[in-house]
Image: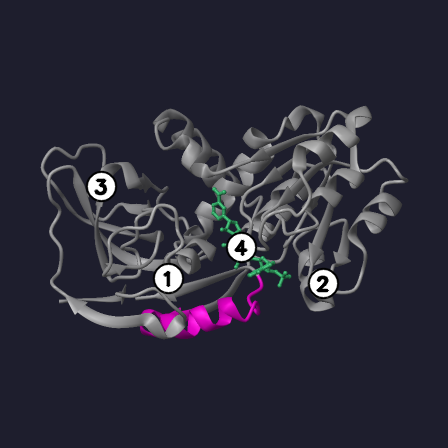
Amino acid sequence: MVRAIQVSVPGGPEVLETVDLPRPAAGAGQVLVRAHAIGVGKPDFLFRTGVYRWMPKLPAVLGSEMTGHVEELGPGVEGLRIGQPVLVTNYTGGCYAEYIAAPLSAVTPLPDGIDLDDAASLSNYQTAWALLNQAARRDTVRSVYINGAAGGIGSAVVQIAARDGLTVIAGASSERKCAFAREQGATHTIDYGREPVVERVLALTGGRGVDLVLDHIVGKDFTDNLKMLAPLGQIVSFNVLGGLPEKDLFREMRAHLPKSPSVRCFTMHSYDHDPAMKQRIAAEAIALFAGGAVKPPIYRRLPLAEARRAHEMLDAREVLGKLILKP
Ligand SMILES: NC(=O)c1ccc[n+]([C@@H]2O[C@H](COP(=O)([O-])OP(=O)(O)OC[C@H]3O[C@@H](n4cnc5c(N)ncnc54)[C@H](OP(=O)(O)O)[C@@H]3O)[C@@H](O)[C@H]2O)c1
């Protein structure tokens, strides 16, 4: 049998059930992977609460990211070997488990010797790299404001942007989280629990504003971001945890016409039908790890059976960086 964490009805952390399921076998085109580390992230919260756009039918095993070793190759699978370290990124779940039989398309081979606990954060670094290099017109970006910077993706953005020599302004909800963002390489931080973000960004940039705003919170005052954009500046929203903007976005963009602002809604699912680009993004993130250019901040390693506690921590917004589960 295989221990796994299952959701039957959407809800709070209490809906996570530890179950024993028959050990899966690798079917045609599938790879059986034995888990080493399981990433916990916001998409898991969306899945748990039943609002994830790519929700599978319930009951289902939670989890979209896992590192581990190849245990079995299904018929027709080539290019991997038994024992190979891999990353599994399976948007429809299944990763909160000791084993997963994943489609080959969800499996990325990893270099031997990579730290598999660290590599459980690779999806965050892929998203962060894509935000900075694909979603944004990277050649024009010298400064970035990242909202909600102390989480998994936020800290990955801070590390990559700092390594690239950008001026990084990180926003977070407390001084504890701001101090953490500075440890990740942020040039400046703004405690949005008590400081006005627009005024502070303008002050920190000598009134010019930033070239790029990365925002997964959004919320009713989202259009205020336009006030702190530099000329030809860009805003990329990659979720709306705080809800939608109150004001009409296009009207507000027109009001800032002298700066020619742009706003993009971004998801990694844009590459679902572009395997070449997915591979390129994965290779970029793996190269950052292999070269030691980034180091994921692991907040806690918890046993898989404590997934409920992990979600309580996530909901309490206490996590700095990344939480991982160990099978
Ligand atoms: N577009 C894509 O392709 C893509 C892919 C993966 C993830 N995402 C999104 O990226 C975001 C970050 O994911 P993550 O895994 O890095 O999350 P995480 O580690 O849980 O971090 C989320 C951060 O958001 C802040 N936050 C602000 N408002 C919040 C709210 N209402 N509820 C919870 N947190 C809130 C928290 O910081 P403070 O307490 O300091 O405010 C927290 O540090 C999520 O919104 C996720 O859905 C997008």
- Give the quadrant of residue 145: top right
Q: Crowding near pointer 1: few (<14 within 10 Å), some, many (20+)?
A: many
Residue 195 is labelled as none
Disc 4 marks which amino acid?
Answer: Gly
* Place of residue 281 in the rendered image (x, y in percent of width and height, measured from the top left): 46, 33
* Place of residue 5 in the rendered image (x, y in percent of width and height, measured from the top left): 28, 66
Residue indicated by mark 2: 179
Residue indicated by mark 3: 103
* Point 38% across, 68% down: residue: 11
Label pair 2/4, CB-CB below 8 angstroms: no
Residue indicated by mark 4: 152
Label 4 near ligand 1 (CB < 8 Å): yes
Viewer-nearest of labels 1 and 3? 1
* Place of residue 269 in the rendered image (x, y in percent of width and height, measured from the top left): 41, 37
* Point 26% across, 72% down: residue: 18
Residue indicated by mark 1: 48
Residue 25 against residue 81 in the figure, above or below: below
Q: Which of the two labelled residues, at mark 2 and mark 1, occupies the earlier sequence position?
A: 1
Viewer-nearest of labels 2 and 1? 1
What's the CA distance linking mark 2 and mark 4?
A: 15 Å
Disc 3 marks which amino acid?
Answer: Pro
Q: Which of the two residues, 225 or 283, is positioned nearer the viewer here?
A: 225
- Give the quadrant of residue 231: top right
Q: Secondary structure at mark 2?
A: helix
